[in-house]
Image: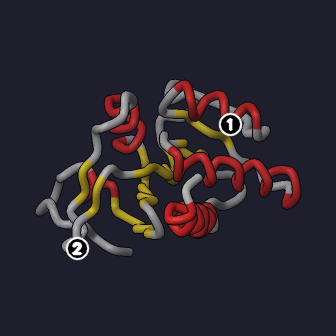
Amino acid sequence: MKPKDDWKEKAKKIAALEAVKHVKDGFVVGLGSGSTVAYAIAEIGRRIREEKIEVLGIPTSTQAFYLAIEHGIPLTTLDEHPTIDLTIDGADQIDKKLNLIKGMGGALTREKIVASCSKKVGIVETGLFLNLAHQAYLGKKDGNLIKL
């Protein structure tokens, strides 16, 4: 890793840890994809082991599936749990007005399906954690982001 990129990795990890603070015992959690979400998946696994919380994960990609298994997160499906308490996912870009771009990865369709089934969607992006109502994320209502 290049020294100039160290701050980005630290920021990603801090943001991911902040996102996981919103995961509660008994939650069904959508597990997004990407490098930032990998930190969140590891932290959820740590909390399951050390805090003994019960959480089920629904992965949005093969990467998230294998990371969840590696970190001891029990998995489920949308068929078994059609309502998700919280999805944690990344974004490709977020501008100063909090407009969000997704779609540069290969798991976009599954990410959108999982997000649409979620009560809340947390977007983690290079040092940011935005707690969003899923209607805003999906462009329902007036299309603006609603910060909770």
Dot 1 amino acid type: Ala
Q: Give the residue number, with chain letter if any, for mark 1.
A: 68
Image spot of residue 65 (x, y percent):
61, 29
The numbered mark at residue 96 is: 2
Q: Residue at x 45, y 49 (%)?
A: 89
Q: Are marks 1 and 2 in contact (CB under 8 Å)?
A: no
Q: Residue at x 54, y 42 (%)?
A: 31
Q: Is residue 19 visible?
A: no
The quadrant of the image that shows the C terminus is bottom left
Residue at the left extreme of this rendering: 142
Would you call the spot at circle 2 few (<14 residues within 10 Å), some (14-19), or many (20 or more)?
A: few
- Indicate the secondary structure of the residue bearing disc 1: helix
Would you call the spot at circle 1 few (<14 residues within 10 Å), some (14-19), or many (20 or more)?
A: many
Q: Is residue 69 left or right of residue 9?
A: right
Residue 84 or residue 107, whichever sits in front: 107
Residue 132 or residue 11, whichever sits in front: 11
Marks 1 and 2, Cα distance to the nearest angstrom? 32 Å
Which one is earlier in the sequence, the residue at label 1 or at label 2? 1
Q: Is residue 14 above or below residue 87?
A: below
Residue 5 or residue 24, whichever sits in front: 5
Q: Residue at x 60, y 62 (%)?
A: 13
